[in-house]
Amino acid sequence: MNWILEPWPWYIGGPAIAIFMLSLLIIGKQFGMSSNLRSLCSIGGGGKVADFFNFDWKAQRWNLTIMIGAAIGGFIAANYLSDNTVQINESLLPQLQEYGINSVGEAYLPTEIFALENLNLKNILILLGGGLLVGFGARYAGGCTSGHGISGLSNLQLPSLIAIVGFFIGGLVMVHLFYPLIF
């Protein structure tokens, strides 16, 4: 069982992703998770409210299956196949403690922010605002990080390369400039 509990090396994960993407390319499909949100809204009747959601979502059933599999696989991995913690470089601990995060090594996400007993109006607004910004950004960029980073780059699409560079810059700006101001 140890082989499944430990992180897999690049020479297994990389080729597995490459084989998956090659098979999608051969059958003419593109991978991405944020496109499933459009499909879910269409299933829920969003086409009655906005034309954007008025499309044949049944053509995207294969991608919905991947989304459901990712959710189920993530649940199984988090609850049964890991100790549910993240390995963090020791040199980062003082900075995290400066932000008031002392739960390193105890939980997957910082309990100071995400634990139910610590959810207050500020944290709820931050989570909702962050979710809206991520959703808007994925829609504005024409896809999410998985769609652009895996599917778009493997298809050698320049807009995907530009989007990925933008995602990384946005993440760096958020962590180094805005995170210390928010927390």
Image: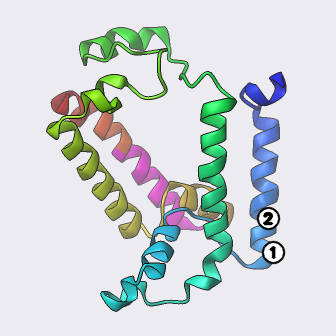
Measured as percent of width and height from the top left, residue 165 is found at 45, 51
Residue tagged 2: 22
- Are the two marked residues, 1 and 2, in contact with CB atoms closer than 8 angstroms? yes
Q: Which mark is residue 26?
A: 1
Q: Tell me where the magenta segment starts and ends, as one range.
A: 157-170
The residue closer to the viewer here, 106 or 12, is: 106
Q: How is the image coloured?
A: rainbow
Q: Residue at x 43, y 29 (%)?
A: 109
The secondary element bearing badge 1 is classed as: helix
Horizontal side of 27 relative to 166 (left or right) equals: right
The residue closer to the viewer here, 173 or 129, is: 129
**For residue 24, what is the image quadrant?**
bottom right
Q: Residue at x 19, y 46 (%)?
A: 125
**Quick one: label 2, few (<14), some, or many (20+) residues within 10 Å?**
some
Instruction: Check residue 169 for magenta coloring.
Output: yes
Calculate the distance from the C-alpha at mark 1 to the C-alpha at mark 2: 6 Å
The residue closer to the viewer here, 151 or 96, is: 96
Horizontal side of 16 relative to 73 (left or right) equals: right
- Kind of residue at disc 1: Ile
Q: Is residue 99 above or below residue 148?
A: above
- Kind of residue at disc 2: Leu
Q: Main secondary structure of the magenta part?
A: helix
**For residue 33, what is the image quadrant?**
bottom right
Horizontal side of 13 relative to 37 (left or right) equals: right
Measured as percent of width and height from the top left, residue 45 is found at 40, 84
Q: Quadrant of the C terminus?
A: top left
Q: Residue at x 84, y 25 (%)?
A: 1
Measured as percent of width and height from the top left, residue 131 is found at 32, 53
